[in-house]
Amino acid sequence: DQQVKQNSPSLSVQEGRISILNCDYTNSMFDYFLWYKKYPAEGPTFLISISSIKDKNEDGRFTVFLNKSAKHLSLHIVPSQPGDSAVYFCAASVRGAQKLVFGQGTRLTINP
Amino acid sequence: DSGVTQTPKHLITATGQRVTLRCSPRSGDLSVYWYQQSLDQGLQFLIQYYNGEERAKGNILERFSAQQFPDLHSELNLSSLELGDSALYFCASSGDFSTNEKLFFGSGTQLSVL
């Protein structure tokens, strides 16, 4: 049972434009959501998070939006830069639980 | 550098064999997590230890086991290996998951079973 889904395996965006990565979840108990970024030959690194009590969190060029009624979150990167090319994983957790549940990842490619 | 160290980086072995993957968490972190990433799959949670005790179990096969030692490093043991066990195995650490802290990942061990 895939509780966190990233339906787009890949996304290609032109440098300077906005990148939008999407994530859907099925478990309504999830109350904390995170995005991780992964470069080849490296482990995932934390990018940005959002609690279920918020609907938006911003950190520089990165903004995460949460729509609880739709069980959907998205990551916006603007403007996109070549260094943003990586695999992005969405993750979710339940407060008090001991694990993060990850999506399958979306490979983002920023074209010059 | 996340501060989480995993060894070895690459491991090639044959079916039926047993291997041990090692992880040293960030200094001060008490929780260690193991994740498996197979081709085109997301990270699948295997198991978590907190200060030496097993805290949570995910989709970990009975052929796999793990432990966390008094110095907080952890080992993941994979036995009777099958071709399908070929994957990237990540270790992650955190201080205290009760507040939903983000995890810090090592660079992984790439296991190839031939």
Image (cartoon, coloured by chain):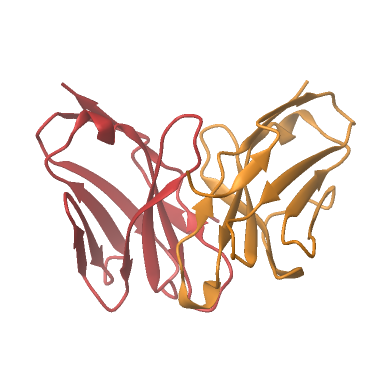
Q: Which chain is orange?
A: B
Q: Residue at x 42, y 64 (%)?
A: A26
Q: Residue at x 53, y 79 (%)?
A: A96
Query: B6 or B114: nearer the eye?
Result: B6
Count of residue discs: 0
Q: Residue at x 25, y 65 (%)?
A: A66
**Left or right: A16 as drawn, with respect to B14:** left
Q: Can you tell which quarter of the image residue B85 is in? A: top right
Q: Position of residue A71 (x, y in %)?
A: 32, 65
In the picture shown, does residue B95 fall above or below B2?
below
In the picture shown, does residue A106 fall above or below B102?
above
Q: Position of residue B37 (x, y in %)?
A: 58, 40
**Left or right: B47 as drawn, with respect to A15:** right
Quadrant placement of the C terminus of chain B: top right
Query: B7 or B79: nearer the eye?
Result: B7
Q: Position of residue B105 (x, y in %)?
A: 53, 49
Q: Residue at x 58, y 49 (%)?
A: B4
Q: Which chain is red?
A: A
**Left or right: B15 as drawn, with respect to B39:** right
Q: Position of residue B44 (x, y in %)?
A: 59, 50
**Left or right: B96 as drawn, with respect to B11:** left
